[in-house]
Image (cartoon, rainbow, N blue to C red):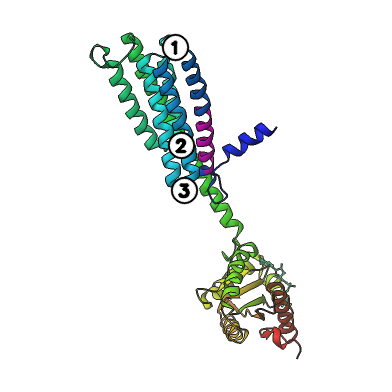
Amino acid sequence: MMFSKGITKFIAQGCSDHLDEETNRKVRVINLFALVGVCLTLVLGLRAIVDGNVPLALILLVATALFGASQRIHVKVGGTMGRVLSMNLLLTCLMGLMAVLVVTGGNGNTGPLWIYIVPPVAMFFGGFRRGLQSNFGFILLIALLLFFPDERLLLTSYSVELKTRLIYSFLTVTFLSAFYEYSRQKTFETVQQLSERFEQQARQDPLTRLPNRRGVQQYIDYELTRMARSGRPMTVILADVDRFKAINDTYGHDNGDQILMRIAQTFRARIRRQDIVARWGGEEFLFVLPETPESNAMILANDIREALAQLPVNIDGERIEVTASFGVCEVNADVTLNRALSLADKALYRAKDKGRNRVCAASQLDD
Ligand SMILES: Nc1nc2c(ncn2[C@@H]2O[C@H](COP(=O)(O)OP(=O)(O)OP(=O)(O)O)[C@@H](O)[C@H]2O)c(=O)[nH]1
């Protein structure tokens, strides 16, 4: 239990919530690969010592140190730089070991069989393009070792058939790995684009294209933090279209939708760049005005109200009048956002009570 917990912790070293899923996955594979590399080369290195094969033991123990170092590098250096260094060191170490196996022949001349580990690992660490480059570089080196005149770069001997088949089969595995990596990257990009689109759609009202409640919440959180720093108040305005049920009943739901779209356009056109207007509910809209006291927001709300009342809305050749009522409330050190929303709602219904098509401030509620 303790052991498996330790391994899990080791494999997660360097992962972070700030990194995307793909990068965290790479970090885990670096850790896992380094761990397997250290264990394998250490065991084989110790066995080589016992067998009295000092050169092999030396090579394997140097590899153990390099595998271990590559894991420490990305943890200590961190960032893209640390990860790239680690991956390059791991890959170089792996390729070096494979080249040694080819040169020496390994156990019973079966050493070259291990080179097929290289293509998938190179693709995973380097991605499609760099993976292909690394694999071609590696196979060129192997070809040089194998086909050097009189096998002078080898400590063993292979048949020509084995050498050529080794190169062909390595290239086949490289292309298959490249194809797999390419499809994986494309699928990953598509999934990422789709998830970004869904995320955006989840924050936007499909009819008016304004942010919905969820979308505006993010903006409000940001503005509240800014307000806490600057100490300047912001103001919220709730607007509700007047007698919209009657409009729907008279002109139909589709025309009602068109009118809501026109209203949204009008609202959006009247606010500053730093302000936001969102669809808060059916025919209800929320304006958030950063660094704006209630008095200034009242002026803006009246401006918007007038613009809407004068908006030419024609349905089936008939000009209809669309108005809205507004409730305004300042958010400041004494009034929290939730309190301000509730007061703005009360002010809005005061505006409705007073005959609609008007603006009412929360500060006037006691009047
Ligand atoms: N066409 C359309 N209508 C909607 C939409 N969302 C809400 N509504 C309608 O808006 C109307 C709101 O009606 P009420 O809440 O009774 O208020 P009202 O008729 O606007 O009257 P007051 O608010 O008192 O001025 C309802 O008939 C809803 O069906 C929408 O997306 N499209």
Q: Identity of the amino acid at label 2?
A: Ser
**What range of the chain is rendered magenta?**
24-37
**Is there a contact, CB below 8 Å, between mark 1 and mark 2?**
no
Per the rendering, the mark at residue 107 is 1
Residue 210 image offset from top left, x and y in percent: 58, 66
**Is there a contact, CB below 8 Å, between mark 3 and mark 1?**
no
Name the residue furthest bottom: 367
The residues bearing labels 2 and 3 have C-alpha atoms spaced at a distance of 14 Å
Could one spot residue 13 in this view of the protein? Answer: yes
The mark nearer the N terminus, 1 or 2, is: 2
The mark nearer the N terminus, 2 or 3, is: 2
Residue 206 image offset from top left, x and y in percent: 59, 60
Q: Which quarter of the rendered picture does the N terminus lie within?
A: top right
Disc 3 C-beta below 8 A from ligand 1: no
Identify residue for label 3.
79
Identify residue for label 2.
70
The residues bearing labels 1 and 2 have C-alpha atoms spaced at a distance of 27 Å
In the image, residue 12 lies in the stretch drawn in magenta: no
In the image, residue 33 lies in the stretch drawn in magenta: yes
The mark nearer the N terminus, 3 or 1, is: 3
Residue at 59 percent of width and 77 percent of height: 318
